Amino acid sequence: MTTSRFYALVPAAGVGARMGTNIPKQYMPLAGKPILLHALETFAALPAIAHTYVVVNADDAYIRDVLASEKHLSDRLTVIYDGGSTRQQSVLNGLHHLRERLADDDWVLVHDAARPGLSVDLVARLLEELREDAVGGLLAMPVVDTLKRADGEGRVEATVPRAGMWAAQTPQMFRYALLCRALEQAQEVTDEASAVEALGLRPKLVGGSPRNFKITLPHDIALAELYLKGIE
Ligand code: C5P
């Protein structure tokens, strides 16, 4: 039996440039509340998650108002005002703030603020599959479309074999000390798993869900609302 605890870390310091809006995408409304709040409530609803940390920019102008009306989250959630210039740096800044609070072998579930479709069941599946794992892993989806690599002119340079290809989602779940070491040593990476892979380790792929997609473009909001209403 493992005695390690589980923590959620949600980087929310991006600006969401592709949304083309004034407010950062994690604060845009979705089904009546800010995008970011959906995942925070999912983690708060799971007794197995000891605590959730959300990393925002030092000058974030939104998070206080968002949480002011969510008193039920106050003892389950801590805001860290120390976002970085990249997602990797925001996660690392958050991890460094937790140095005194987490043990080396505690698990950290890093989750994008922009994935509001995360459900309690998906987190439970991830914990179940990985709690005894030596490395850790991530939610991911097998790729179903045929993959093309483009040349500089938007023409197909090659068709990439699809067999064995997965699209990474979050949460990505690794032990605290390993995750710190991996992200400190990695060159620019866009997820935690790639940093861990760079250490020569092989994170486990755990089946995710289409509803856990990342909101990137304006029309994604309507799609996410459909998923939250109950289509699977
Ligand atoms: O921009 P993208 O969708 O890839 O961002 C993924 C997640 O990383 C979002 O939750 C975003 O807020 C976060 N992020 C961050 N710090 C940055 C850039 C992105 O916390 N500098």
Image (cartoon, rainbow, N blue to C red):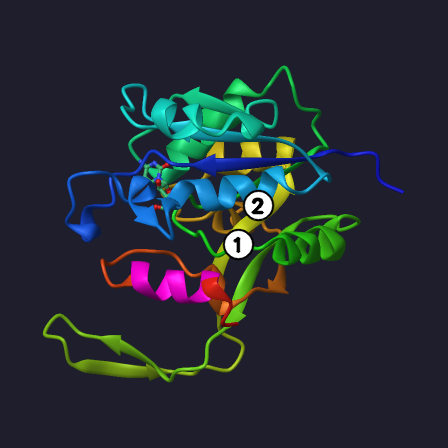
Left or right: 73 in relation to 177: left
Q: Quadrant of ligand 1?
A: top left
Q: Main SS type for the magenta part?
A: helix
- x then y, percent, for residue 228: 47, 60
Is there any visible trace of residue 201 in the rendered image?
yes
Task: Look at 53% across and 38% down and name the residue there.
Answer: 182
Q: Quadrant of residue 24?
A: top left
Residue under label 2: 42
- Decide: marks 2, 1 in contact (CB < 8 A)? yes
Gap in Å between the C-alphas at discs 2 and 1?
A: 7 Å
Hey, what amino acid is under mark 1? Leu
Task: Look at 48% across and 57% down and name the residue there.
Answer: 117
Choose the circle earlier in sequence order: 2 or 1: 2
Hey, what amino acid is under mark 2? Thr
Task: Tell me if residue 133 is in the magenta stretch.
Answer: no
Q: Is residue 77 above or below residue 190?
A: above
What is the magenta range?
221-228
